[in-house]
Image: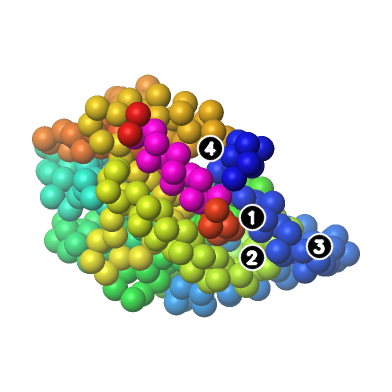
Amino acid sequence: MNQHLRHQPIPFIDTVAQRQRLGQSLDAAVARVLAHCQFLGGPEITQLETELAAFCGAKYAVSCSSGTDALLMVLMAKGIGPGDAVLCPSFTFCATGEAVALTGATPVFVDVLEDTFNIDPASLRRGIATATRLGLKPKAVIPVDLFGQSAQHDLIAAVAEAEGLFVLDDAAQGFGASYKGRRIGTFGLATATSFYPAKPLGCYGDGGAILTDDADLLDKLRSVRAHGGGADRYDNIRLGLTARLDTIQAAVLIEKLKIFEDEIAARNVVADRYTRGLTDVVNVPRLAEGCTSVWAQYTIRLPKGIDRDQFQAALKAQGIPTVIYYPKSMHQQTAYRIFPVADGGLPVSERLSSDVISLPMHAYFDEPTQSRIIEAVRGAVAG
Ligand SMILES: *Cc1c(COP(=O)(O)O)cnc(C)c1O
């Protein structure tokens, strides 16, 4: 490879390659909305909701303004509030616990498993006991399908059922993945996902959706989405939000959903190449039994003795971006230190926060570019 190509910057996520592939069809989809002018609640909204539900085998989908609002809307629709505890992993994007805190309920942080980065059922049980001891009412658990891999939903469901909690799956990163042959979107009471541009299924701005089989919840979610409205337009029956998805974003998503299956396959090819190229030098991500991933991130753990800042700088010098998801677990962050953690502490979350690093990941890698990253990682670890 010549010197110029060797140092050409590599994008962390290639939204441009995908845009080029979608080409004219995407222009036309947006142009249709610009022609009919139903910028909110246009026909694309219903079409997208139908297609999202069909994609994952859920009965209903409710589109909304973001993944965070998707989580918040379910909690609001279920009447979660002060005095309630909602269990969630600490090693996640902040929105998981933030949605809980916004309702006035208490997020209780639990630990994750070392190999999958997803919620640890034993820590979940301890967290429920902690919540009860603190005088809180444990109401729900939010497992996260972190980095694109399905959580082990049977194990979580068993604990939730025994303890009378409902399950709200945070699939912001995992939409499209499956567990025991079933797509994410049908586990627990409801599933929230995000269409933030960098997620596996992203739109061209903010967006999200909720999937559920529960007709009563569906009604409440639609009400919460628009100010808590009821049958009488001017008699709002609960507190709600302005949380609709724009029609233009729905039009974009309809086009992207057509190639999503293919992109998931491509992401798995990319992940396999990383794993083959790196398994002997760093801790590569592992899939648990029955779980698939859409590889929202390809996150490795550096071996002991490798300085993460130096490693990151060495890759950056070669035009290779990396990101640390997440340098602080939620319970270590300023806004969330006040909330309880499961008895026994969260040692795995803390360890992960100190040694993980995510490599560029998207569906549009060519093999030479990926080889360049693999060689750079191997070189940086060798020192
Ligand atoms: C991105 C993300 C969210 C929030 O989604 P937004 O659309 O950005 O609000 C929630 N949970 C997890 C795990 C996420 O990665």
Residue 378 shown in magenta: yes
Front tag of 4 and 1: 4
Mark before the other along the chain sequence, 3 or 2? 3
Q: For numbered disc 1, what is the local secondary structure?
A: loop
Front tag of 2 and 4: 4
Image location (x, y in percent) of residue 350: 25, 32
Residue 315 shown in magenta: no
Q: How is the image coloured?
A: rainbow
Query: Which residue is label 3 attached to?
Result: 27
Measured Cα–Cα span from mark 2 to mark 4: 27 Å
Query: Which residue is label 4 attached to?
Result: 320
Mark before the other along the chain sequence, 4 or 3? 3
Measured Cα–Cα span from mark 2 to mark 1: 8 Å
Query: Which residue is label 2 attached to?
Result: 256
Mark before the other along the chain sequence, 3 or 1? 3
Residue drawn at (13%, 50%) of the image? 122
* Residues at discs 2 and 1 in contact (Cβ within 8 Å): yes
Query: Which residue is label 1 attached to?
Result: 203
* The quadrant where residue 276 appears: bottom left
